[in-house]
Amino acid sequence: MGAGELSGRDVLTRSVKGQLRRVALGSALGSVHQLGEALVPVLIGVVIDQAVDGQNAGRLTLWLGVLAVMYVTLSWSFRLGAKAGERGAEEAAHTLRLAIVDRVLDARGGAEEGRLPGELANVATEDAKRVGAVNMALMSGIWAISGVTVAAVALLLTSVTLGLIVLLGTPVLLWLGHLLSKPLERRSEAEQDKAAHASGVAADLVAGLRVLKGLGAQDAAVERYRRTSRVSLAATLRSARAESWQTGLVLALTGGFIALIALVGGRLALDGSLTLGQLVSAVGLALFLLGPLETFAWVNAELAQGRASAARVAEVLATGHAVVDGDDPVAEPVRGELRLRGVRLGGLDGLDLDLPAGQLTGIAVTDPAGAEALLRCLGRETDPESGSVELDGVPLTRLDPAGLRAAVLVAAHDAALFEGSLAANVTPDEESESGTADAEPDLRTEHAMAAARADEVADSLPHGIATGVGEGGRSLSGGQRQRVLLARALRAGPPVLVVHDPTTAVDTVTEARIASGLREFRHGRTTIVVTNSPALLAVTDHVILLDAGRVGAEGTHADLVRTDATYRTAVLA
């Protein structure tokens, strides 16, 4: 099973052991490096004492050789430890991104509720990266603890007083650093919230740029983003100030601690308690401690930001599902009979509706809210407040949501096209398997494109079906995008297809040809067209009018136009 087929929980679980192994390896290698770093001042002190003694040149040479080997060990242990740390951080961030994407794409939905797409993208990128960096921070913290421990032992062997100062003072410094990181954690979380909101607003503005220009509202939209961006900037500056204060105060405390060690070491050397070499070792160890203690300050800041981002990631992963999880598989073969009983949701008011299998059914509405609610029920984006929806006699709540999505495809009129070629948008499943969809289309794709008149779109493009359509299909006109979207839905070939207003942006001649192509392509399979388009309703086997959330009339399009005034008003006005 590939990573893309795993649930977010499975991806996280399967990655934990590998992450722990890398943390352990990186920590061990880093600790070896810190051990070497701490022993360097000790070895230099021994070399100085041997040189001052001057009685044994061989021993002096031996210690110089040991010092050289130590530097080689330092170099390799640092390189390998840093490599393990960086890889652990990047893989942790990658694992979180997979888990977040898996949650967002979960067939049961819910993760997108109350969040702009840009906000979710920010969580999956910036927040995941910050949480992944905690791996490197933890390893660095372990390295620093190892270094401080070795330095403290070395100082204890040199002077009990100096060793006790390090052993007792380091925990105090860590505690103070933790307290100083609290404001940074709070402001970092606020910064990420505001930045995510600004990203979401920016993405919305870019997506709706054409509409905004058409309405002449681009100036108001830019001003809205400017205000949001200012709020985000202010939050970022507050977070940066908190980080600078935290770093500055911790460094000041660290500097004072190092100065205390040097002062005590100097006094011990003056009264003869330390040799010259031991004094050099003590001062060198004190200077070495500056590195681990600065690392502690950096680790505190990283952990503060990581905790804030982890809370945002956890919030997305823990979001409740929009629909309950059914366990029953969809029975094969799918006949495609849909039935609604007493459904109340949005504009639907106790709706009873029978949609027969194998027919092309048109649904016209007097209230667009009713159409939206019906689509959400059929696509199971949400469950009705009351009542039930059934597929082949089985309530949708009992069916596995992923299996249901494969059996019933709801193609919304405002669905998105993706960056890439026209072919990749019509046959995304082929692209995922082969890595490209720019080759010659198969027969099913050709028929689907012909039925939706998307072949005419391909013929008008410079590179045909291999032409890139731009982000969101922005290089295409509204009518061209609708034809490509319909071709994609037809090519998917689900047992039940529900399409919503697929031709609102095409001319009447093309609409009539699309209506004919749709009927021919979906012959014998359950197809529901939610629209008020006379051209589409005219080719259906049966038409249902939804009025005030209930069935207002039924019949053929021609009969309803002749006999029902409400239908005539909804469809022909």
Image (cartoon, rainbow, N blue to C red):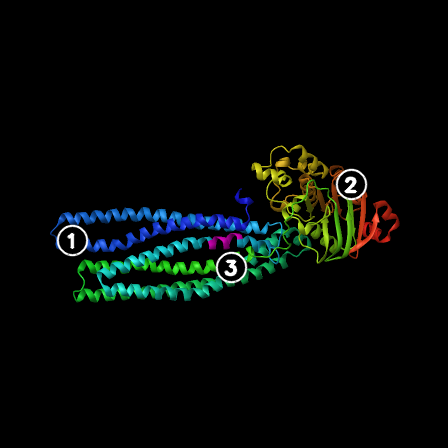
**Relative side of 89 to 55, left or right:** right
Q: How many marks?
A: 3
The residue positioned 73% from the left and 42% from the top of the image is: 335
Q: Amino acid at mark 2?
A: Ala
Which residue occupies the foreground of this view, 296 or 7? 7
Q: Residue at x 61, y 58 (%)?
A: 114
Mark seen at residue 512: 2
Residue 34 magenta-drawn? no
Sequence order check, earlier mark of 2 and 3: 3
Q: Which residue is mark 3?
A: 311
* Residue type of the residue flagged with mark 1: Gln
- The image quarter containing residue 260 is bottom left
Residue 134 position, x and y percent, is 44, 55
| Residue 526 percent coordinates (x, y) | 74, 42
The secondary structure that most of the magenta stretch takes on is: helix
Residue on which disc 1 sits: 50
Q: Amino acid at mark 3?
A: Ala
* Rendered position, 311 above or below 332: below
Which quadrant holds residue 496? Answer: top right
Q: Secondary structure at mark 3?
A: helix
**Residues under labels 2 and 3: Cα distance?**
53 Å
Q: Which residues are magenta?
A: 124-131
Q: Secondary structure at mark 1?
A: helix
Q: Is residue 300 left or right of residue 388?
A: left
Give whichever of discs 1 and 2 has the lower sequence position. 1
Circles 3 and 1, Cβ within 8 Å, touching? The answer is no
Earlier residue among tags 3 and 1: 1
Q: Marks 2 and 3: which is nearer the front?
A: 3
Q: What crowding class fits label 3: few (fewer than 14 Cα within 10 Å), some (14-19), or many (20 or more)?
A: some
- State the CA–CA distance, disc 1 to disc 2: 99 Å
Indicate the position of residue 58 as horizontal and vertical percent values.
14, 47
